[in-house]
Each structure stands twice: as C-alpha cells, then as structure tokens.
Amino acid sequence: MSTLPLFPVTTVGSWPRPDSLLRAQRLNRQGKLSDEEFNAQADDAVLNFLRLQEDAGVDVVTDGEQRRDNFSSFVAEKLSGVRLFTLAELMDIFEDKAGFERILQTLDVPAYSISNATCVGKVKRDRPLAADDVRFLRQHTDLPIKATLPGPYLLTRALYVPETARATYPTKEDLGEDIVRVLREEVEELVAEGTDFIQFDEPVLTELVFTQGMARTFMCATLAASKDPSEELEFAVSLMSRVMEGIDAERVGVHVCRGNWSRNEETLLRGSYSPLQPYLDRMPVKQLVLEYATERAGDALAFEGKELGLGVVNPRTERVESVQEIRSEVREAAKLYPPEHIWLNPDCGFGTFANRPMNREEIAQAKLKAMVEAARSLREGLG
C-alpha cells in the first residue's frame, strides 16, 4: 500500500444504490436482463461512487458493494450449494414459524425487503466473491483499495439453516470447514491481486454477548446463541485463524457493529465491546473496524497490538456530525492508540441492504466529507 497520511479515511463498504441499478438487479434475477447488461449498469454505479470518494478526499476506496443485494447474501450468486431466500420464503421453511415472525416484527424488518443466502448443498466457490470487483477498481484508480467480505463465522451462521443444510452438513461445524476453504481461496486471490485492505464483516458477534440466548436475528435465524456465548466465540476465532493461517496479507481487518438493519435505534443491540475483547484480541488481523459513533457502543477500548478503524459517523441518522465532534472522538481514541494506528470510518455501511439503505446519498456524502475535513484538521494540528 502506498504511504497513507495519519488518520486515513475509508468506508465500511456499502453505499446506497441508484434506483436504476436496483431495477436492473430485480430484472436480472428474473431473467429479464442479461448479466452483461446488469454489469454495465453496475460498472457505472461503481465508477460514480469511486469519483465521489476521490472528490471527497477518501484515502482508501471501495466499490460501494454496488453489485451486491446485501453485504452477505450476494454469495449465493458466487457459490454452488447456496440459494437466495427472502425472509418470507424462509418463514415457510422454519419449523418455528411463529417464533421467527415475532423476531421480524420486534426487529422492524419487513419479510419482503431482505434476502438470506442459505445452504442447500455442497458449498464450493464457483466465482470470486470480491476479486473481480478489485480488478475493476484497479483499472480506474491509483488509490489503495479495500475489499469487503462476509466473515467466516457470519457465513457459517447465516448459511446454516438445518431444515435445508442438514442433509449435506449435519452440523454448523461441518459447514464451517468448507466456508474456511472458500474464504482462503478468495483471500489468496485478493492478495495476488495486490488488494490493499481485506475487511471481514462479523456483525453477529455482538448478538452472542448481548442477547443471552433470548433471540435469533433475521440474519442467522436458526442458530440461537447459548446463554454462555464462549463456545460460539471460540468457534469464531478458530474459523478466522484457519482462514488466515499462512497467508501474508498487507492489512486485514474485522468489522463488528451492533446491527445495521433499521434506523430505529431501539431495535439495535446495545453494550460495550468488553465481553468480546478477549476474543477480538486473538483474531489474527491487523485492524478492528468498530462502531463508536453511537452511545450504544460504550467507551472506546484498547485492543492489544491492533489498529482501530474508529466509527465516527452514524450511517442511520440524518444529522451530519460536525468536524469538531469527529475531532473530539479521535482525540479520545488517541489516549488509547498511537495516531498512526487510528483510521476514520462510518460505524457501518450506508447501503447494507440494497432495497433498504440506511440513508440518502446526499446525507452519506456529507458525512464522508466531514470525516475527511476532520482528518485533515487533525493532521494539521499535529503538524
């Protein structure tokens, strides 16, 4: 990676898709628009977001996940043995239909608006998950590039619906073996492409420690956490360790938040990262990309030997954080981390779900610019 300034600014990954691209995605799934025609429109959307990042002064760019239906379910288009189900379709499959419907109502998630990639057979990597996207970006920018991937625990947990998977994988651990293999293949290709930053998304880790086995989220509808989450957290660390074993990547990060499916903050998880600290400390990654722009996240913690991707703007709110607010958050983090170990990013994606973005593009763009201005101001102050 080329030399970065202090307090590099980047995004967590996703960006609101234009309406024309959402229509193209629907038509493509219905077989009414060819892959070539869809990708031509997606190329334009990616380039528009790339130029927006460059104009704003973002230091490490992403493709905005413009080709994806959401941050994890897009793998259904890339992996054999995986099928995309809407939440409404999943309700017809689950043995506990009433329980799942109660969860959706509580969490403010319309069953028609979000899809889940679900294991229906032997899982294999048919196409790259993100490497093709990196290749496309590399043709159009000299800036460092971040590739975003669903983490191995998230994928294992989300794909494993016993009603559809148990014939091939009797347990989630059996599926996890193939998920590790798929992600190792992907990471090796991303490294060969010279990807500057590989980010794994593991948002459901917070569910393990904050729900105490009381709920099953819509993303991982059939794997309720036990009241003691340690076994599941050890499993998550083991999966990530096996994915990264022997791989020499320049910078790998793990993103953990408290949910980004609703703008109603009351439905989202609440609590400090402290119960996760012993496990995140052991994750074989260089950076932790963490949510801190909401009071639900508690105070910043020091993670031994890690960089901090500091969440300084909330993607779900209309209010644009001031430069002074962001500077203040960074100064607090600098009490725990050296300045060269602090990056600035939103708490989560602005367009996590294609059909349910968390914000309008103009608000998201203003938040990006505020982060960039705050980073420049901090650099000048240190200078």
Image (cartoon, helix red, strand yellow):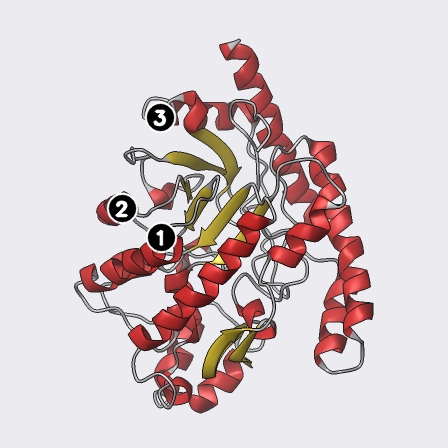
Q: Which residue is mark 1?
A: 245
Circles 1 and 2: CB atoms closer than 8 Å: no
From this view, report whether residue 98 is shown above or below residue 237: below
Foreground pick, 19 / 39: 39
Residue 96 to residue 248: above or below: below
Say whether residue 263 is visible: no
Q: Nearer the viewer, mark 3 or mark 2?
A: 2
Sequence-first tag of 1 and 2: 1
Instruction: Label 1: state its secondary structure.
Output: loop
Q: Amino acid at mark 3?
A: Tyr
Give the image quarter of residue 58: top right
Residue 283 percent across, percent down from the top left: 32, 48
What whole-number distance in Å separates the C-alpha atoms at marks 1 and 3? 26 Å
Percent position of residue 8, x then y? 54, 30
- Badge number at residue 150: none
Amino acid type at circle 1 is Glu
Q: Which mark is residue 282?
A: 2
Q: Quadrant of residue 205?
A: bottom left
261 vs 373, left or right, is left
Secondary structure under tag 2 reads loop
Residue appearing at x 39%, y 57% in the figure: 243
Residue that protrudes farthest toward the top in the picture: 383
Left or right of residue 59, residue 335 in this image: left
Mark closest to the chain's N terminus, 1 or 3: 1
Q: Residue at x 34, y 58 (%)?
A: 242
| 97 left or right of 363 in image | left
- How many neighbours does mark 2 have within 10 angstroms: few (below 14), some (14-19), or many (20 or more)? some
Q: Which mark is residue 337?
A: 3
Q: Taking the image as drawn, is residue 91 in sight?
A: yes
Residue in front for this viewpoint, 247 or 352: 247
Residue 19 location (% of width, % of height): 76, 62
- The alpha-carbon separation of the residues under discs 3 and 2 comes to 18 Å
